[in-house]
Amino acid sequence: MSREIFVTRSSMPEFEEYTEEIRSVFESRWLSNMGAKHMELIRRLKEFLQVERLDLFTNGHMALELSLAALGLKGEVITTPFTFISTVHAISRNGLKPVFCDIDPETYTMDVKQIESLITENTCAIMPVHVYGNICDVEAIETIAKKHHLKVIYDAAHAFGVTYKGTGIGNFGDISCFSFHATKVFHTIEGGAAVCHDDAVAQRLWEMKDFGIHDEETIDLIGPNAKMNEFCAAMGLCNLRHVEGEIAKRGRAAARYRKNLSDVKGLTLNRIQPEVKPNYAYFPVRIEAEEFGASRDEVVSKLKEQGIYARKYFYPAVNACGCYRDTCNPDDTPVAKRYSEQVITLPMYADLAEADVDRVCEALLESRR
Ligand SMILES: *Cc1c(COP(=O)(O)O)cnc(C)c1O
């Protein structure tokens, strides 16, 4: 078997760049609790993402969980079943009830035409996801939220660096949360951030990530420990220097995929959105088994035989997972259900060579019966 191609591969700085970055951490022995690297990364990310207020967390999930907590929500939150399980767990772990809205067939994001029919007197918020870096209909969501006095918390885990009409994607909604997990476009090994637009909310987030501590003798909030440490922040500082180049390299791999797969019967590629600067976080392909000549699951196992690892992302839909199945019906979101059975994300990372893209595409096409 030829060399394996994995679905993702973390971007890394040069070893020496990282060791140079952590030299001062060794010297100061200030390893966590909002040290110099933590504060510098906040400053640099605010610039890069064009946002006013940003806080760092141990991971993207804690950013989501604490964002819901910081807004003091109670009741039902409308969200999407076509996401990573983290989104919905963040709702449930806050004692809130997730209500699933189906997705738009073009963008994989929440179908805004269906949101209002799901609003009840208990609805407190909408939690949409910028799936694969495709942006939600942020304008329609804002209109609905204003009309019904709902908070909007975006799961922007896939959308680092994406802009819409020149505006950083973190500026939409009440809070937007990013993930800096090792597999994401930009990473801090593990990490995450929340962007908000209100000083009081920002202050609550700042305290909540550190046990709710305001100062040595004042603790008025209940919170976990979700502080990003200095080694992770240092990795972020290094990766941020190169992220634009890394996104450009992903763009070249994406263009190669498009060239190879655009006109294949039974394959639907991700739509390019107008006025959006993309980050090429993923390369999703939807497979219509009859037209293509092989089902999604057949394709995944055929690729695996060739040492190529594609991912069924997202499968199963969240409302079909054991932990939520008893409280909802996946048939209520038919598009998400069908798409979760058809979609694969192909290998995508900055260092993916064009020759490897060609090999993946060849194996994909050969998997037809
Ligand atoms: C990665 C991811 C998360 C969670 O982020 P972590 O940093 O892994 O905790 C949440 N939502 C989505 C859509 C993700 O892809």
Image (cartoon, rainbow, N blue to C red):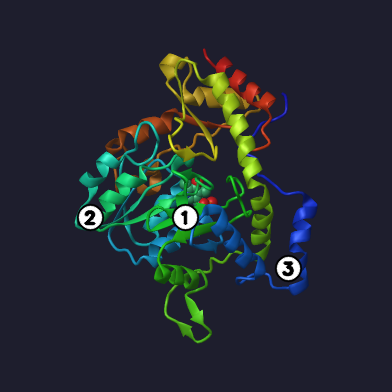
Q: Which residue carries the number 2 mark?
A: 148
Q: Nearer the viewer, residue 357 or 339?
A: 357
CB at disc 2 and ligand 1 closer than 8 Å = no
Which amino acid type corresponds to the residue marked 2 in the rendered image?
Answer: His
Tag 1 and tag 3, C-beta contact below 8 Å: no
- Binning the other alpha carbons within 10 Å of mark 2 as few (below 14), some (14 to 19) or many (20 upward) gives some
- Binning the other alpha carbons within 10 Å of mark 1 as few (below 14), some (14 to 19) or many (20 upward) gives many
Disc 1/disc 3 C-alpha distance (Å): 27 Å
> Quadrant of the rendered structure where residue 307 is?
top right
Chain-order first, disc 1 or disc 3: 3
Chain-order first, disc 2 or disc 3: 3
Q: Is residue 309 visible?
A: no
Chain-order first, disc 2 or disc 1: 2
Disc 2/disc 3 C-alpha distance (Å): 48 Å
Q: Residue furthest bottom?
A: 217
Q: Residue at x 52, y 12 (%)?
A: 369
Which amino acid type corresponds to the residue marked 3 in the rendered image?
Answer: Val
Pinpoint residue 131: horizontal percent, then vertical percent. 44, 41
Q: Is residue 288 above or below residue 17?
A: above
- Mark number, residue 190: none
CB at disc 1 and ligand 1 closer than 8 Å = yes
Pinpoint residue 246: horizontal percent, then vertical percent. 64, 41
Q: Residue furthest left?
A: 121
Q: Residue furthest front?
A: 166
Q: Which residue carries the number 3 mark?
A: 25
Tag 2 and tag 3, C-beta contact below 8 Å: no
- Mark number, residue 177: 1
Pinpoint residue 284: horizontal percent, then vertical percent. 50, 31
